[in-house]
Amino acid sequence: MAIQQPGNDLREPLLLLCHRIPYPPDKGDKIRSFHLLNYLSEQYAVCLATFVDDPNDWQYQEVVESYCHRSLILPRRGLPHLSALLAALYGNQPLTLPLYFRRDLANWITSVVTELGITRALIYSSGMGQYLKLPALSELHAVVDFVDVDSDKWRQYAETKVWPLSWLYRREARTLLEFEKSLNRRSAASLFVSAAEAEMFRSLQVPEAKRVSHYNNGVDGRYFCPDDRLPNPFKPDQAALVFTGAMDYWPNIDAVVGFAKEVFPVLLKQHPELLFYIVGSNPDRSVKQLAVLPNVFVTGRVPDVRPYLQHSLAAVAPLRVARGIQNKVLEAMAMARPVLVSPAGLEGIPAIDGQHVLLAGSAEVISQRVAELIEGDWQNLGLNGRELVLEQFSWSASLPLVDKLLQRGAEIKLMDEKRALHDY
């Protein structure tokens, strides 16, 4: 646990609740939360309450605290106490909520809001929205960044499982959606990661749908930039397909397991020299086992994913379950690499098949595209993709909307204006 005491700070205090420590920015939700923290810390005296769910992240505690006026960083425990789970089950509540509830965190929030007279809050992810029920927060002007429609992820998970998990996941989808709706009623604005995600949430018979909008993720185009000087992790004569992402995240696990077992063997028959690299932290056991397959490599955590992208034949994003926007796709496009992406992996990115990316939803299409890339086709694809990302995915263009919505009275007008401009 870490509590940073306030200094002589004249900026208005802001409560920021985040389900996972927003550093390092090495996975989708943490990339977005870090840039949000960085931006808000320039405008407000941020009071952050968050969890650490990866022990490796404790080393970044001081980095996170440096952005904060006050902070509370707690370890997120494993499964909640059985009594909390049973209470959620019998109370028709989503099981997600007990995962992110701690009494000491609730007490700290109440204390800091009361002591500093905080009037504004940014809630990052639906699981942290339950703290808005605290009496001290009843009058707070709150903006919720849902990021994704999490309830729909559980619906998609249920479709891939057998009973009893299918029943449990359907229940979670139903109860979490009701909680998301209630959170939208409570908030001044509800934000999502893309126009498509915001429209999808509105379509679910959400009350006060006019409060729902989005702001795009950004990509650091100076960091994710093509550079031949990056060290080549492959041999000069090797052609590699590369998947990047956190490998303890189920949609990523499902994507690489399906690709390695169902698609890659088809590619190897035609291109025996081809390699498939799975690059990302905390690989699940089922992912590690893929390394026994011919020409499949599992790296685990690497200090820098850019060399793998820079020297790849193409990045692949064969996601079958997805919500929101895929940073792995944006980063590979920013590196000017060809990207073979499934329809699910392209959601929220206005890229055109054959102009910015290669849409590939089946083994047959992927095989054809790989053959074309090996032959040297699609020479301008990567540069087109990079240009699109630089034009439409900028943090400096996206984040000011959040600050505007944190001002009382601005939400409805701004939401309508933003929707007219972007939600098409």
Image: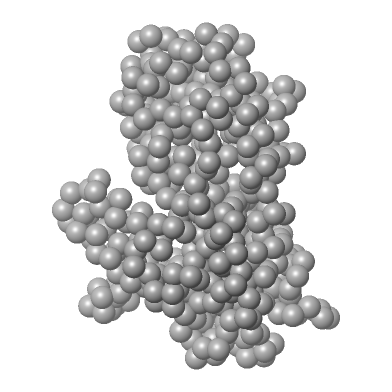
Q: Report the residue that reaches farthest toward the left.
A: 163
Residue for point 45% across, 55% down: 197
Residue 405, given in percent of the width and then of the height, sits at 62, 71
Measured as percent of width and height from the top left, residue 111 is found at 60, 88
User: Can you give x and y, in whole percent of width and height, for residue 85 in the image?
Assistant: 30, 72
Does any portion of residue 293 appear in the rendered image? Answer: no
In terms of image quadrants, where is residue 81?
A: bottom left
Picture quadrant where residue 337 is located:
top right
From the viewer's side, name the closer residue of 373 and 328: 373
Q: 4 left or right of 287?
A: right
Q: Residue at x 63, y 91 (%)?
A: 114
Residue 256 lies, with reference to residue 170, above or below; the image says: above
Q: Is residue 308 above or below residue 18?
A: above
Q: Residue at x 54, y 77 (%)?
A: 188
Q: Up-down: is 270 above or below 228?
A: above
Q: Assign the N terminus to one quadrant of the image.
A: bottom right
Q: Is residue 167 visible?
A: yes
Closer to us: 214 or 224: 214
Residue 199 in the image: state x and y as whole percent: 44, 58
